[in-house]
Each structure stands twice: as C-alpha cells, then as structure tokens.
Image (spheres, helix red, strand yellow):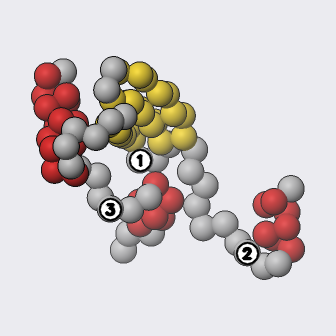
Amino acid sequence: MVEEIFRKIGLIPKVTVVKTRKYFDCGSFEVTLDQLKGLGDFMEVEAKKNFGGIDKTRKACSDFLDRLNIKYKVKKDMGYPRMLYQKLHKK
C-alpha cells in the first residue's frame, strides 16, 4: 500500500534490499546476523550495557569478537540501501 502511494506521487524505487536477519542473545551483547542478496553477510554486535563509556564499550565488543575468534572489519558508515546502490551503479 505505501509503495503504491509512493508511485502515485512520483517516487521511484532505486534499489530493493532483500535481507534475512537473525538475532542472538549473548549475555551482555546482542549479535545480529544479516544476509543480504547482492552484498553478502554482515554481523553487528551491540552492547546491552555501558562498560564505562564509549571507548570501553567498543573495546568490550571487540574483545567479545576476539574471544570467539571472529575476524572482522568495521562496516562503512552507510546503510545497506546506499551500499547496494553503489555496487549496482559502479562506473
């Protein structure tokens, strides 16, 4: 219904993000696994408590991943729609 309204006012979709998301409760952390068609797999770790400030909380998240022996890169500071759009429209 909303998509129909958008079309009627002239808004055209740029990309469609197809995503499967799974949530895991890991004690002091919540882990989200996203599988995105055309982009691959992404993981987000969110602290459920304050570990003593932003820097200490980020370190706690990094330490959590290190304990699980998970290698990671910090995601670009953009959402999935922009990432997919850029991938589809590379020149």
Q: Earlier in the sequence, mark 1 or mark 3?
A: 1
Q: Earlier in the sequence, mark 1 or mark 2?
A: 2
Q: Amino acid at mark 2?
A: Leu
Task: Tell me the residue that label 1 is attached to.
Answer: 39
Q: How far is mark 1 from mark 3, CA to CA?
A: 15 Å
Q: Marks 1 and 3: which is nearer the front?
A: 3
Q: Is residue 65 left or right of residue 88?
A: left
Helix, strand or loop under label 3: loop
Q: Earlier in the sequence, mark 2 or mark 3?
A: 2
Q: Amino acid at mark 3?
A: Asp
Task: Tell me the residue that label 2 is attached to.
Answer: 11
Q: Write the residue at 41% across / 22% down.
A: 25
Q: Determine which quarter of the picture holds residue 44.
A: top left
Callout count: 3
Q: Residues within 10 Å of mark 1 (few under 14, many from 20)?
A: some
Q: Amino acid at mark 1?
A: Leu
46 vs 20, nearest the viewer: 46
The extreme bottom residue here reads 10
Q: Identify the mark at residue 77; answer none if there is no mark.
A: 3
Q: Is residue 17 above or below residue 51?
A: below
Residue 46 position within the rendered picture, expressed as x and y whole percent measured from the top left? 34, 38
